[in-house]
Image (tube, grey):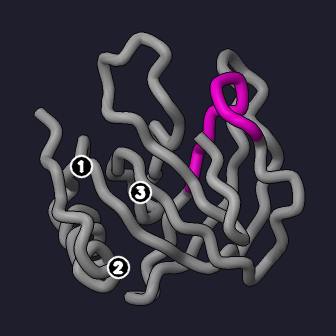
Amino acid sequence: MILYVSLGSVLANDRVLQDAFKHHKSNIQVKGAGSVIKLLADDNQGSRHQRFLLRLGTGQTILIAHNIDLAAKISNLEISDVVEFYGEYEWNTKGGVIHWTHRDPNNRHVHGWLKHKGTSYQ
């Protein structure tokens, strides 16, 4: 079951993500934003994913795993850049991961996206 969160303020969604981490919740569709704190190597095993870490306003860190087989890669991403996201949160011990930040070509999942410097990636 996916819990849909209101697309209200980023701070409210930061609190939802903080609660999801604290209570080990997953499958939460959420919108938010954070500052890039680390760029990671692309995951090229299976579906390729661009990976980077964001710090939210609450201090929580989350991994963004953006499928670059289904959506364009953010090519000019740098440390301290702000990235907005809309995707599905999955719990892990390090703060969680946001994935499904792209359109579902089979229309079985909510379409997600990333926004960086005025450009949308989906």
Residue 100 appears at what percent x and percent y? 46, 37
Q: Is residue 48 left or right of residue 27?
A: right
The residue wearing badge 1 is 28
Circle 2: residue type: Val
**Between 101 and 59, the one nearer to me in the picture:** 101
The residue wearing badge 2 is 10
Circle 1: residue type: Ile
At 43% across and 78% down in the image, what residue appears? 60
Circle 3: residue type: Gly
Q: Is residue 80 left or right of residue 112?
A: right
At 21% across and 55% down in the image, what residue appears? 24
> Of callouts 3 and 1, which one flags the residue occurring earlier in the amino acid sequence?
1
Quadrant of the snapshot with the N terminus: top left
Against 106, is 97 above or below? below
In 3D space, how far apart are the residues under numbered discs 3 and 2 (Cα atoms)?
17 Å
At 60% across and 61% down in the image, what residue appears? 115
Residue 68 appears at what percent x and percent y? 71, 32
Specify whether residue 66 is painted magenta: yes
Which segment is the magenta one? 64-72
